[in-house]
Structure formats: structure tokens, C-alpha cells
Image (cartoon, rainbow, N blue to C red):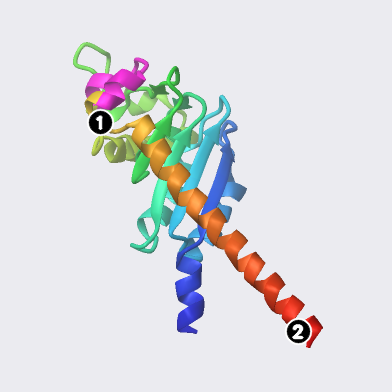
Amino acid sequence: MKSKRTKSTRRNSKLLLKIRWGGCIEEAYQLESMLAKKPARLHIEFIGPGELSADTALLMRSMLLKRSPRTRITTNARSSLQGATALIWLLGDTRLIREDARLIFRPAGPFVGDNARTPSWRDFCDEHDMEEEDYIRVLHAMNEFLPVKELAGRPVEVSVLREFGLVDNQKVERLLATAFGRSKERRENARTSRQKESLKEACT
């Protein structure tokens, strides 16, 4: 049993999130399944113009926070990220983002700028109250990485993300190429060894 666990922790996994408006519930449970296998590295790739609902983002955040301490998360934004989607990208241990992509999230609750009108609960239908509360929780979580109140409501460029030490694309890309290259080499070596053993058995 010990050797099986050791083998599983060396695996590299990849999850593609095709962002739709409020979607990705199935991908969230796929993420949970991948994390349960305790891979050494999980690569989460974002693509698409949509936005995760705040509830889905909080669900995925809870999964990521409970992951094995041996699992390293890399997040790669192939598209601009809107709203709660940005939180999942920020949770990566290492982060990649397309050079012309941006983070875009609206202000809410205590993160509304001093010169903006603070929305009251009457601005929302009752059915939207819980969704807005979840979105404010998302902003609180994002505020651990970025000054949300100052940045909300305007596109956050890659240059700004670099100022906060959140991205270093060239360094991360080299690390990923090395990690996944070694993983591929190990698989090929294992396949070659099995083929040699099969050939020896056939000759005896």
C-alpha cells in the first residue's frame, strides 16, 4: 500500500476549465477527484469569456485549501478572468497568464470605492441576496492577494500583477517544462522496461 501512495503523489494532472457563465460544476467535482489522488502537481488551465458563479468559486476554493500539502497547484489563464473566476487563478502556488489578458472584477460590499455609491440590499431581489453575499466572500479571499478596493471596477493588467509578485511567466514556464518533461521521460522509461521484460519472458 505504501508504494502505491508514493507512486500516486508523483503524478502530474491537468484540468481544463472552459469558463461559461455560472457553469463548471462538473469540472469542480472533477477537480475534487483529481486532488483526492494527491498528484505532485496539478495544472489548472482557464479559457473562455464566461465567469464562475461565486458559489462555484467558493466550492473550488474549499477543495484546493484541503488538498494534500504535497500537491503544488499551477494556474494558467489563457483568457481574461472575470469576477469570482480570478479567485481560483490567484490560489495557484505558481501562476501563468496570457500577456494581454486581464483580471476584471466589480466592487461590492466593503470593497466599493470611497467615491462610489454603496449599494443597499434594496438594490437586489431577495433571490440574489445570497449570491451577493457569496461574491463579497470571494472579494475578501481575493483581498489576501490584491488590494481589491483599489483595483475593483477596472481591468488589472499583467504589469500590475507583476508588481504584486503574482506572476513570473518565463520562470514558471521553464519550471513546468522541466517538471512535465521529467514526468514524460519516466513514463517512457517505464514503458521501455516493461517491453524488455515482456521480450525476455517470450524468449524463455
The residue stretch that appears in magenta: 148-162
122 in the magenta segment: no
According to the image, label 2 marks what residue? Answer: 201
Q: Is residue 83 left or right of residue 202?
A: left
154 inside magenta stretch: yes
Label 1 neighbour load within 10 Å: few <14, some 14-19, many 20+:
some
Q: Is 4 located above or below residue 21 in the figure?
A: below
Dividing the picture into quarters, in which one does residue 106 lie?
top left
Ranked by sequence position, the earlier of labels 2 and 1 is 1
Residue 190 vs residue 171, the one in the foreground: 190
Horizontal arrangement in the rendering, residue 87 relative to residue 10 (left or right): left
85 vs 69: above or below: above
Q: Inspect the image, locate mark 2, and give the three-letter code of the amino acid beneath it.
A: Glu
Q: Disc 1 residue type?
A: Leu
Q: Position of residue 36 (x, y in %)?
A: 49, 65
Q: Which residue is mark 1?
A: 146
Query: Is residue 161 in view from this perspective?
Result: yes
Residue 14: % across, % down: 54, 49
